[in-house]
Amino acid sequence: MPLISAKSILEDANKNGYAVGAFNANNMEFLQAIFTAADSEKSPIIIAASEGAMKYAGPEMLYSMVKTLSDKYYHIPVALHLDHGSNLSAVMTAVKAGFTSVMIDASHFPYEENLKLTKQIVGICHTVDISVEAELGRLQGVEDNVSVAERDAVLVNPEEAKDFVLASGIDFLAPAIGTSHGAFKFKGEAKLDLERLKKVKELTGIPLVLHGASSVPESASNIFEEFGGNLKGAKGVPYEVLKEGIKFGINKVNTDTDLRIAFLAKVRESVSKDKSQIDPRKIFGPARDYVTEVIRERMKVLGSSGRI
Ligand code: G3H
Ligand code: 13P
Ligand code: ZN
């Protein structure tokens, strides 16, 4: 089927109380893993490509691979989404290449500037049915013992979110509620600010996005460490916490780190078990299969399995 905007995928998730994974990809193996998992789980998917991914693989290459796989798995609803676009030029590069959804991440700017740039991008993208995501607040963990003022300075302000959604016309919003990118998300207990999330949902009603949502599953981290890697102190968002977030309004769950750990865990295992192997396919093949497994498990947790 043709690539579709993420808006249509997320509207169903919002209506029916589940979440769809936005899985980051930079190369063929990760894309194949995402599509194979979606096929087995009968799940819609959002393929996320960052500016770094566009630089690494080329936006046209990413689009062509996604389009080819989407034609092969014609029954799977797929959106190709620019992750963390930082300016108009990056958004236009993605749009010209054929992406069907974009994120403009201007959350580090003051509110008015974030709103101005986001509105401009909504104005362009909506004329060609491309959905737009924006972000409010900063993606970083917040310790339990910080003051209310410090917490408010970092995380999303629900009233501001309401005004921002109305004024910008965005299709879905990433509210900062205590997660961060990468494998080291929490020093203490892994938790989200669910009260804040609940308020944002009540006041906006639109699909909400959890960035930094990887779970750092023990099974993958153990293999990574068994074969010489070091992930000491790594902690992700546990499955039970993800499920709570989904109950309170999260509909898009961004996942990159878990796939990276899974892939490299198996690469480490293969290269250390067979030191004279020179065929990359013997190394990347099992790594790709393991990424597929990790994605399938995640689709079940998110509730996107069986939705097509
Ligand atoms: O949110 C960031 C994603 O994990 C993409 O990371 O910019 O290294 O491609 P990247
Ligand atoms: P993780 O680092 O938790 O996988 O988050 C990825 C992400 O938010 C991509 O936008
Ligand atoms: Zn992110």
Image: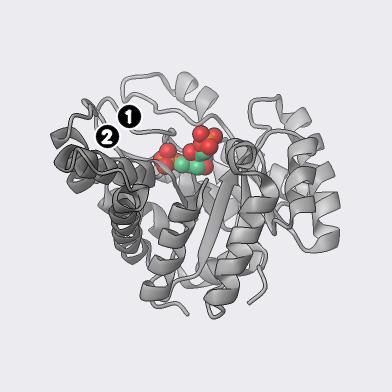
| Count of all numbered marks drawn on residues in the image | 2
Q: Earlier in the sequence, mark 2 or mark 1?
A: 1
- Residue at 39%, 26% in the rendered image: 142
Residue 85 in the image: above or below residue 130: above
Give the quarter of the figure containing the N terminus: bottom right
Q: Nearer the viewer, residue 281 or 240?
A: 281
Kind of element beneath mark 1: loop
Visible residue check, residue 215: no
- Residue at 22%, 37% in the rendered image: 224
Question: Quadrant location of residue 67?
Answer: bottom right
83 with respect to 144 (left or right): right
**Numbered label attached to residue 184:** 1
Per the model, the C-alpha gap separating discs 2 and 1 is 5 Å
- Dot 2 crowding, Cα within 10 Å, few <14, some 14–19, many 20+: many
- Where is mark 2, residue-wise? 235
Question: Quadrant location of residue 222?
Answer: top left
CB under 8 Å between discs 2 and 1: yes
74 with respect to 306 (left or right): right
Residue 230 in the image: above or below residue 156: above
- Residue at 35%, 53% in the rendered image: 281
Q: Nearer the viewer, residue 211 or 113?
A: 211
Q: Amino acid at mark 1?
A: Phe
- Residue at 51%, 64% in the rendered image: 45
Where is residue 161? Give x, y as percent.
63, 42
150 with respect to 90 (left or right): left
Residue 156 in the image: above or below residue 305: above
264 with respect to 119 (left or right): left
User: What colour scheme governs how the chains and residues are painted in the rendered image of this protein?
Assistant: one colour
